Image: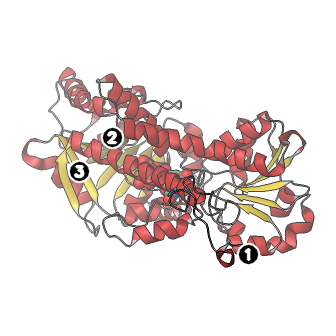
Amino acid sequence: MRATILGLGYVGLVTAAGLAEREHDVVGVDVDERRVRTLANGIVPIHEPGLQSLVESGLASGRLRFTTDAQAAVSAAQIVIVAVGTHDGHGGWQTRTMVDTLAGIVEHMADDATLVIRSTLPPEFVARLEIIVSQLRADVGRRPIPVLLNPEFTREGRAVRDFLEPDRVVIGVAIDPGGRGVNALTRLYRGVQAPVLRMSAIEACLSKLGANLFLATKISFANEMALLADAFGADVTEVTRGMSYDTRIGGAFLRAGIGFGGSCLPNQVTMTVRAARAVGIEMPLIAAVGEVNARQRSMFVARIASLVGDLRQARVALLGLAFKPDTDDLRDAPSLDIARELIEAGATVVAYDPVPSAMEHAAALVPGLRLAADVRNVLLGADAAGIVTEWPAFREIAWSDVRHLMRRAIVVDGRNALDPAAVAAADFIYASFGRDVVAHAPRPAAEPIVPDVGVVSLPLSAVPD
Ligand code: UGA
């Protein structure tokens, strides 16, 4: 099929390259001329495993092209997919880009074409979408076109695999009399081994939001369990392992630590609470999920401070900057808040991330942040090392080999990524989230252990040492 994708960010680019891989004839459109030129030259400007080779093979086969000419690209397409951004960059939604994009393309779409929205939409916009598109067609005297939602569920770092082998394909129907649009979109996904779920547009919108909110809830839940584990001397990874074999719960997204970052989970938590409030609904659970997440970042800083003492005299090495491994994305990355908080407290903060673009970007975002070229250099003279992103290379650090580089042997593991026994064996003080069984011994019970039945006299031999 001939498909045109508007917006070549993470979502749009993966969709365009993935559809070309599935042998569709794809045109990717973006307003950013430089981005389009770079992509047309076969260079992918983001770090996403597998995407570079997918783009290269799409270009080589001629099935993938890039342009800034939206009008020409949409008029030739059977399916037009919109994947422009809907975040305002400050924890809120913005639909201006979506509205402007629609205004530029809808009148040029062929009468037998289908419009598909892949961007995550604010719920209140879904009803407006239908009206906007119908009006834009009516204004130029053209026939109505089907309008569908097709939310993406791809994770950064695994986006190519998630696109090519999705768990499910959700199709939300906004306008589709006769089902022509659903047929076209189903054809586009032909060969995908996944259930295709058809529902209303608002149900599709809320499925997407609901999935992310639930994942965020699981993470904050695990972080609450980590507090309990620390307080009572348990290892939270054992606790969640024990929970995970229950098929109703599962083990995914129960890793405790500094919490979730990225362009999706944190934003969608705050945006949902705000959107709900705007229609008179309170969402205390989702609001708490966000609060717990923000607390984790500060707890990481507090943990470092409690171990190094005066932060003003301390040099802290941050290992990892991206919000998770296999990406260079720094949007709402915990590293940024953590670095800012440490610098504000007077610490010297040096960071290293395996992806150079993440480091350059972080230096621009956090004044005073210093960068190091590799693991050894970031640890040089440090009073504490903080694991912020669980890149595989950090799991492989032989701590006994780097011990002499550091001023003090302290590791605070924000991702519970290291083997505590191995780090402790290298003579380090090790702290993490919900696994500090030794560091945080169980507190003495508040209640007397011997039932209060008056004075109990024990025989001398029974008195413990
Ligand atoms: C998320 C969803 O997982 C995707 O399904 C969705 O399509 C995407 O948002 C989107 O809306 O576009 P993504 O933002 O790429 O994907 O990242 P996740 O893999 O969900 O990770 C989010 C954050 O949670 C990361 O900072 C990660 O380190 C953290 N995390 C994850 C934990 O702290 N604990 C866990 O157990 C799992």
Q: Is residue 74 visible?
A: yes
Lower position in the chain sequence, tag 1 or tag 3: 3
Task: Identify which residue is drawn at 58% across, 54% down.
Answer: 44
Residue 429 falls in image quadrant: bottom right
Q: Disc 3 designates what residue? A: 171
Residue 63 falls in image quadrant: bottom left
Q: Disc 1 designates what residue? A: 422
Q: CA distance from mark 2 to mark 1?
A: 57 Å
Q: Nearer the viewer, mark 3 or mark 2?
A: 3
Residue 297 higher or lower than 439, as above or below: above
Callout count: 3
In the picture provided, is 431 more to the left or to the right than 454?
right
Asked if ligand 1 lies within 8 A of label 2, the reply is no
In the picture provided, is 4 more to the left or to the right than 347?
left
Residue 403 - label: none
Residue 144 location in percent, x, y? 15, 33
**Cβ atoms under marks 1 and 3 closer than 8 Å:** no
Lower position in the chain sequence, tag 3 or tag 2: 2
Q: Nearer the viewer, mark 1 or mark 3?
A: 1
